[in-house]
Image (tube, helix red, strand yellow):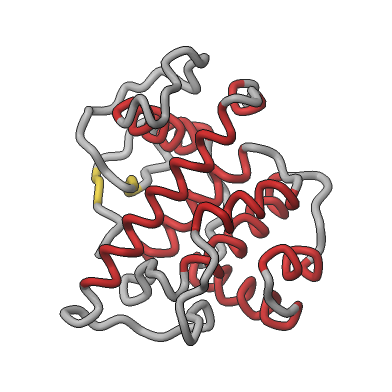
Amino acid sequence: MAELENPNVMPKLITFLSSLLEKVAESNDLSRSFQPQKISVFHGLTRPTISIQTYLERIFKYANCSPSCYIVAYVYLDRFTQRQPTLPINSFNVHRLLITSVMVSAKFLDDMYYNNAYYAKVGGISTTEMNFLEVDFLFGLGFHLNVTPSTFQSYCSYLQREMMLLQPQFNISDEPSLFTSTRSSKLYLYFSEEDSSHQQQQQQQLAV
């Protein structure tokens, strides 16, 4: 989308996505002792020392994928957590989920993209691990990779609205609108998709 090509929009979007994922991870970290959470290939033995924002900024700097990939990667993360309720995003898996979701979205959206070995270097993991993560992520999504224009619009509208609510930290009032939002003002971390229509009829919260 042309609005995402605006050089002033993407850095703010990256910062906001990082903040959002950090809050979700912290929330799920606290709930680990109350709700069962499976250990998966995405889990590290320890929390990575690099922050979520620094990690996502690194991906943004070196991946060179289209701006839309970051919206679609967010959609994929939401789908993954909906389909895998015992694998919520937390501090131990968020980094691997991020690099994998961006790589998969780039492969699906972009005509030209880097291979797994390159993304592995960007993400600070081995190529073998990157390959395993990709396969597990695809199966976790049920290979549901298509994102309709209406779904893409809903996510963009939500993200823009949330960024505007957090002004002045994410002041985008002087930026062109990504989309005209027609959704309610309730705050949700993701939408249950209804791709066959222009409305998503049920909404759920990402943090389990």
Residue 122, image x and y in percent?
72, 63
Residue 67, image x and y in percent?
64, 37
Residue at figure coordinates x 20%, y 79% from the top left: 35
Residue at figure coordinates x 43%, y 37% from the top left: 155
Residue 100, image x and y in percent?
61, 64
Which quadrant: the N terminus? top right
Name the one closer to the observer, 154 or 176: 176
Q: Give above or below for 161 relative to 191.
A: above
Name the one closer to the observer, 159 or 30: 30
Left or right: 8 in relation to 178: right
Left or right: 194 in relation to 128: left
Displayed quadrant of residue 3: top right
Residue at figure coordinates x 73%, y 83% from the top left: 128
Name the one closer to the observer, 181 or 24: 24
Left or right: 54 in relation to 46: right
Residue 57, image x and y in percent?
61, 49
Residue at figure coordinates x 32%, y 58% from the top left: 24
Q: Residue furthest front?
A: 49
Left or right: 188 in relation to 49: left
